[in-house]
Amino acid sequence: MTDHNPILPEDARIVRIKDTEYVAIHKYWWDKEKKRGQQKRRYIGKLVDGKFVPNAAYAAELKLTRVKKTTDKRQKFDHDKTFGTTALLTQAAETSGLTDDLKKVYGEGKAAMMVSLAAYQIIKNTTSQHRFKIFSDTNALPAGLPDNIESQRLSELSQDIGSDTASLNRLFALRAKRLPETEYLSFDSTRIASESRSLTDVRKGISKRGGYENQIGLALLYGHNSGVPLMFRRFAGNVPDIVTMHDLLTRWENIGVSKKIISIFDRGYCSRENLRLLCKNKHHFIMAAKTDHSFIRDAIEDNLPAFWDMTNNVRGHNLTAVQTQVTIPGTKEDPKSCSVWVYIYYSLAVANNEQDKFLSDLVTFEEDWINGLASPDSKLLRFYETPDSEPGKKPLIRNNDAVNEKVRYMGFFSMISDRKLESKEILEIYRTRDCIEKCFGVIKTDVGFTTTRGHSDVSVNGRLLLAFIAATIVSWLIKAMSVEVKIGKKSYAPLLDEYSLMELLEDVGQIRFYSSSTGKVWLGEILGRHRLVFERLGLENCLLNPAMYK
């Protein structure tokens, strides 16, 4: 190690803030008084062109702690590696059936490599692969991992798996076979920034921070009960969600998803065309809908008194609800109509809050207008008579008819389904779909996939597959950590009550793996609480059989 090229510490994590990648060391501990995990982040530098550059404080510390190399007891063995963290992740992939599916499609060697890379991405919070060789030298990984894991080999792997569409679809089909018949599937999409303009699907789009950036679309199909993603696809970054339905249903058929499963969509997918398409293909669905659809407003008007009738109260939700059957007419191209159930909900509290905010916004806008501060292109102008002068000259005159129409439908929201169920059941099923938003959060935060750094389509496809594998492992673990378990006669509360996932990985990281030149492998000391963690997650097999690692 030199002053100009220090080695990135093993316990360091990459923290991306805007366009800069900082390097930090996290310290986790359990606060007995607050009864929750605490963490402290210490920044030690940043990544510049993929190389670690320490800050002044950490650089000074390196100079003080640099001493002559000495031998220690770890050098008596051929290998002394961190075991607990990687074992927890890779065993989760094994226990969930993910590793087995990958082996059937890609073979044992590639499967071990893909799971290991996914574990590396989770631990290091990065999709960059250039330091994986160092990681593999200091962390126990599956024994089936090929010996050649240099950067060139990793690049070839991304190219290989990224160009093999047939194998990817086979993997999705195997994942679909593991779904329970009572599963609910959420479909949604997000946008991923791209550093390359040469990718097929890169388009200019609005970023989260405002302004425009190059981006691609990433769609995901997620199982509510299984707690893991089932399928992903990329598409052009400027394609709206509403037009992706036909592609989804085609892929759905190709991977063999049972039509008994109910799919769930947010209101961005609601259109008459999509409703007809779902009904025509006989797919069960629940879809949120905006109240500005004419057939939704007609249903509200037809049932208006019922929303103030407490016999329609949805217990436990402070809502009233009405359900009604609606016919969606056909088109010239496809004249066959379809019948759906519309579930409309009303919240007086939401209506009051929305109305207060809306009227307050109007008052503020009117004051800004007379002071010359309002924009002449504001969308709020539709609630006023057309002004005959610029801002700052004459006051605005409200269009009360437009205001009344806006206020009239505040507090209402609706769902559409092909199934006739209780209004409460439809609502509660739909509200579980926040799991897919959390999975997107896993991909962007826990896996660090905020930007595509590949410069070819097949390379990006390969990295997306690795991110999908990593997200599957994290999602499965979080699901396992969120349930109560019984071991023997004793019941245990969910692990999430004690740890976050990253705190858990940090804690079990002290379990070490040793091997000798004679081929013997063994684990170092395992604390009782660590052994219990593996047992509560159903992952204790790796502690009993360390020969599965190298």
Image (cartoon, rainbow, N blue to C red):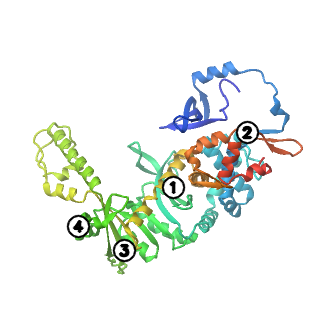
Residue that carries the numbered disc 4 in the rendered image:
304
Q: Is residue 509 above or below residue 260?
A: above
- 182 relative to 403 in the view: left or right: right
Give me the C-alpha separation between circle 2 and circle 3: 58 Å
Label 4 Cα crowd, 10 Å radius (few <14 / some 14-19 / many 20+): few
Label 3 Cα crowd, 10 Å radius (few <14 / some 14-19 / many 20+): some
Q: Is residue 349 above or below residue 22?
A: below
Q: Position of residue 544 (x, y in %)?
A: 77, 51
Give me the C-alpha separation between circle 1 and circle 4: 50 Å
Depth order, front residue of 337/198:
337
Give me the C-alpha separation between circle 3 and circle 1: 38 Å
Give me the C-alpha separation between circle 2 and circle 4: 67 Å
Residue that carries the numbered disc 1 in the rendered image:
200
Disc 2 is placed on an element classified as helix
Q: Quadrant of residue 462?
A: bottom right
Disc 3 is placed on an element classified as strand
Give me the C-alpha separation between circle 1 and circle 2: 38 Å
Precedes in sequence: disc 2 or disc 3: 2
Per the rendering, the mark at residue 138 is 2
Amino acid on which the number 2 mark rests in the picture: Thr
- The answer to whether residue 136 is visible is yes
Q: Is residue 543 above or below residue 219?
A: above
